[in-house]
Image (spheres, coloured by chain):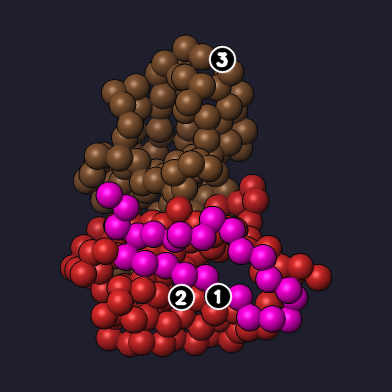
Chain colours: A red, B brown
């Protein structure tokens, strides 16, 4: 059973517009969520995170929103740029897990069209 | 720091051969993770170590897979014998307890 789901395998967005990537989770024990970005032939790199005590975290063009009641989070990229084209992974964990094991979604491939 | 180092970057082998993937975590990190990425299943955690001790290997697909971490600066993932369905990109990541995971560049394995 997938505890973290990214239901859109791919997403295509026009350059300059907003990209919205979605992620759903089932385990109510998760209290810390992360987004990673992955370019081809490279390992994933950390992008932005959010704790369950917040509902929004912003870092430049990237904003993550968390809706705990819906067990849903989203990553907004505004404005989208060609360099944002990558695979985005959503991951979740619980801070009580001292080993910091992440549970990963399957990823969403974002394509920014010029 | 050079980041997480993995070798080889690419490996092509024939079915039945033994494959060994290597990882050097970031110095000072005490957790190490092995992941496999495939088109069908995305990023799967295979096994992770804390202070060189395997904590959870429930993601290891079969007995053909084994992982070791003889010291804090080195880990291996071995597949013996390899099969075509093992073809994937294998990532190693390391972290300091409570911190984010830093990934290596991955090893692309092709089993013919």
Q: Which residues are magenta?
A: A1-25
Residue B62 is one of the magenta-drawn residues: no
Circles 2, 1 touching at the beta carbon (< 8 Å)? yes
Q: Nearer the viewer, mark 3 or mark 2?
A: 2
Mark 2 neighbour class, 10 Å CA radius: few under 14, some 14 to 19, many 20 or more: many
Q: State the residue at coordinates (41%, 87%).
A: A56
Q: State the residue at coordinates (31%, 26%).
A: B62
Q: Nearer the viewer, mark 3 or mark 1?
A: 1
Left or right of residue B31: residue A78: right
Q: State the residue at coordinates (47%, 70%).
A: A22
Q: Are marks 3 and 1 on the same chain?
A: no
- The chain letter for the residue carrying disc 2 is A
Circles 3, 1 touching at the beta carbon (< 8 Å)? no
- Disc 2: which residue: A74
Q: What is the secondary structure assignment of the residue under circle 1? A: strand
In three-dimensional space, the C-alpha distance between marks 3 and 1, rounded to whole angstroms, equals 42 Å
Residue B86, x across and y down, in percent: 47, 28
Relative depth, front residue between B72 and A29: A29
Relative depth, front residue between A106 and A38: A106
Q: Is residue B31 above or below residue A11?
A: above
- Disc 3: which residue: B14
In three-dimensional space, the C-alpha distance between marks 3 and 2, rounded to whole angstroms, equals 42 Å
Q: State the residue at coordinates (44%, 86%).
A: A57
- The chain letter for the residue carrying disc 3 is B
Residue A12 is one of the magenta-drawn residues: yes
Q: Is residue B18 above or below residue B62?
A: above
Q: Is residue B33 above or below residue B22?
A: below
Q: What is the secondary structure assignment of the residue under circle 3? A: loop
- Disc 1: which residue: A20
């Amino acid at each position: 059973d997938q505890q973290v789901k990214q239901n859109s395998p791919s997403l295509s967005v026009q350059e300059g517009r907003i990209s919205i990537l979605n992620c759903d989770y089932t385990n109510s024990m998760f209290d810390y969520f992360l987004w990673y970005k992955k370019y081809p032939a490279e390992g994933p790199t950390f992008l932005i995170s959010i704790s369950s005590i917040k509902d929004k975290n912003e870092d430049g063009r990237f904003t993550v929103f968390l809706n705990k009641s819906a067990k849903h989070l989203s990553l907004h990229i505004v404005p989208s740029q060609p360099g944002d084209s990558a695979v985005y992974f959503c991951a979740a964990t619980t801070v009580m897990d001292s080993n910091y094991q992440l549970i990963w979604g399957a990823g969403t491939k974002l394509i920014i069209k010029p | 720091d050079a980041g997480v180092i993995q070798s080889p970057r690419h490996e092509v082998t024939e079915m039945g051969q033994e494959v060994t993937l290597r990882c050097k975590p970031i110095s000072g990190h005490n957790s190490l993770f092995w992941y496999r990425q495939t088109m069908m299943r995305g990023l799967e955690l295979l096994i992770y170590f804390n202070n060189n001790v395997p904590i959870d290997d429930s993601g290891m697909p079969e007995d053909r897979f084994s992982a070791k971490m003889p010291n804090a600066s080195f880990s291996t993932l071995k597949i013996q014998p390899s099969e075509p369905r093992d073809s994937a990109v294998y990532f190693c990541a390391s972290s300091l307890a409570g911190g984010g995971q830093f990934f290596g560049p991955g090893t692309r394995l092709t089993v013919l």
